[in-house]
Image (cartoon, grey):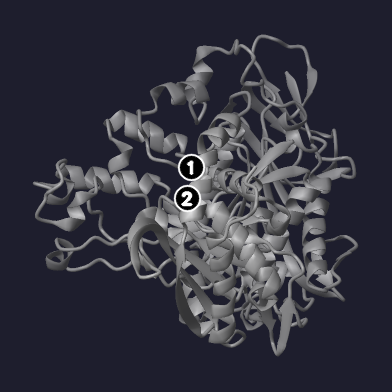
Amino acid sequence: MTDVVMPQMGESIVEGTLTKWLKKPGEHVERDEPLFEISTDKVDTEIPSPAAGTLSEVLVEEGNTVSINTVVARIEDGGNGATRPAAAAPAAPSPKQTAPRPEPPAQETITPTPAPQQVEDAAPAGEPAGPLSPLVRRMARENNIDLNRVQGTGAGGRITKQDVETYLSQQSAPAPKAAAPVPQPARAAAATPRPASPPPPAPLPPSVQAKARIEPMSAMRQKIAEHMVLSKRTSPHVTTVHRVDMTKVAKMRERHKSDVQSRYGFSLTYLPFVTRAAVVGLRQYPLLNASIDGNNIIYHNEINIGIAVALENGLIVPVIRGADEKNVLGLQHSIVDLATRARSRQLKPDEVQGGTFSITNFGSFGSVMGTPIINQPQVAILGVGTVDKTPVVIDDAIAIRSISYLSVTFDHRLIDGAMADQFMTKVKQVLEDWSEDVL
Amino acid sequence: MRSCQLRELGRVEYAAALELQQELAAERKQGLICDQLLLLEHPHVITLGRNARAENVLAGDEILRRAGISFFPTDRGGDVTYHGPGQLVGYPILDLREWSRDVGAYVRAIEQVIIDTLADFGIKGGRVPKLTGVWVSEQKIAAIGVHISRWVTSHGFALNVTTDLSYFQYIVPCGLTKPVTSMARLGAQASVHEVSRSLAAHFGRVFDCEMLLETAIPAATLE
């Protein structure tokens, strides 16, 4: 016989209300199976049974409040007649995963979720990113489903039980065209390996369904959308483009590239040079490093530069804090560190906050020039085009130089074209007459 | 230092968020994932805690349906509450065995996170003896309702940022007849997103964990 007592749920808690019995007297209960629920201070807690056996006696009715360690029930464990008081599980946690589990095999079959190791072993290779519930994994295993083919409709694109069921019903439907395993070149939408799943919000008529696929935006996509619209609505955007001769910087870069690679393990790109030049420009023209608050101008004393990083399905702008205190090497180090952690989703919230100016390096994707959107509440953003060897006229002679187009988009509420161009002239001058040490 | 993954989910239907919580809680119990903090908004919904009394929902089904409010019984503690746009909802999925096996301390810590967050926006929030939640001069600004199973928490708190308070007319919030308020009502010009950022930072500090960011704040891009 095992006594079941009201567990102690915390230092300051002396009593609890028994809100619900999950088993009736006479019913069998497994050890660790939820037995009753208690309520303390707006917290409801499920209390697992301290032992396996038959619930022989219920001593406290639902709705009653009793002090801790009060016996609320007894469990007949059959055979063993000795009574030992046992606090219910929160005070005595279930065995650690790492410890060997000498439990009877019968328990494994009743435990609602399989042991984690089992799940990991059986998880299909190359399953989609993001956590999957044990239930979904099991369903996939039992039905031999490649979860990459299942469209997730849960929060953050997670695959839910319902998604798996929907997928299964589509599979069993006669001639499921959309679920064809090979992409059909005739249809652009079919180029993705996922089958077209019926849109949850508003199902389209079958005729339209064959020509389109609807899926909900991820939370990140929604935020990007919101942010972009907000920025365009807030600031009158103007972009000005300057042509910059990067030949000197290209030479500096060539000279130090292998040294930086071997000593620090990352490559030296054009971006830290441009960032450094932007810092010099911002020091001279602090209005581009400001924000607007009502009818006031906030001049930021710090120069914190956001660097746009492309992610697989979105983008993020981590911030180099105190960018004016770093040299080219320090800036490159920060850029590599932030970009790497952005891609592995290891950024801390304060690393994407507090930017005062942003740089977006679309040149790395081959773009010659672009017109970026301002990252609110900032007032300007610098876009960097590719660096290409280009024939240019110098002193009436044609020369081959490394040319890049830099564009700055600015908020015309605060900054006029003349100032933006003065800023760009400064940036251009720093880059063309590069004189600072790199290391 | 323990890690806590921050998931900013945007606007999520109550049922979808509930399912996500249950999945994450199951994974947390098995030690497959670290602690989680879900921050989100719900569309209009009225939820009932385990101990809720039906008479605290003042409006009938028909009125609620016409107002576009759905209705949900849940397994959290507490009575009736309303969620809707402009309200920052937080669902911490924590294994309290790794923090403190103390339900009371947990609820007080959640209150502290909210009080510290409010302070960032110039609002002085506090506690009312014997009542759970956060209050600003006798008006309720944040509600708390928690479920715990094997020391793993689910459900959590709801902080009114720019909530349209007229929706509370349909219920007696948490069975109390005290008035509700919001940060906007108290003069703070903050979006749910800004408050969520501040709250995540305070959460990390109060619960002594490193907050890992899953979804991101996007910003500048090419057109």
> What amino acid is labelled 2 in the image?
Ala
Question: For the residue carrying disc 1, how many other residues have a C-alpha within 10 Å: few (<14), some (14-19), or many (20+)?
Answer: few
Q: Is residue A51 left or right of residue B111?
A: left
Q: Is residue A269 left or right of residue A292?
A: left
Q: Which residue in the structure is indicated by mark 2? A: A250
Q: Eyeballing the image, is A269 above or below A51?
A: below
Q: Which mark is residue B41?
A: none
Task: Provide the chain ID for the residue under circle 1.
Answer: A
> Which of A187 and A43 lies nearest the eye of the viewer?
A187
In the image, what residue occupies the spot 55% across and 12% down?
A104
Q: Can you give x and y, in whole percent of width and height, for residue A60 in the image? A: 76, 40
Task: Provide the chain ID for the residue under circle 2.
Answer: A
> What amino acid is labelled 1 in the image?
Glu
Q: Can you give x and y, in whole percent of width and height, for residue B42 in the image? A: 55, 66
How far apart are the two marked residues, 2 and 1, measured between alpha carbons?
A: 6 Å
Q: Quadrant of the N terminus of chain A?
A: top right
Query: Does residue B210 appear in this view?
Result: yes
| Helix, strand or loop status at disc 2 | helix
Q: Is residue A293 left or right of residue A365?
A: right
Mark 2 in CB contact with mark 1 (< 8 angstroms): yes
Q: Can you give x and y, in whole percent of width and height, for residue A287 in the image? A: 67, 78
Q: Which residue extends farthest front?
A: A396
Query: Does residue A42 appear in this view?
Result: no
Q: Can you give x and y, in whole percent of width and height, for residue A3 in the image? A: 77, 25
| Helix, strand or loop status at disc 1 | helix
> Which of A95 and A410 lies nearest the eye of the viewer?
A410
Dot 2 and dot 1 within a common chain: yes
Q: Which residue in the structure is indicated by mark 1? A: A254
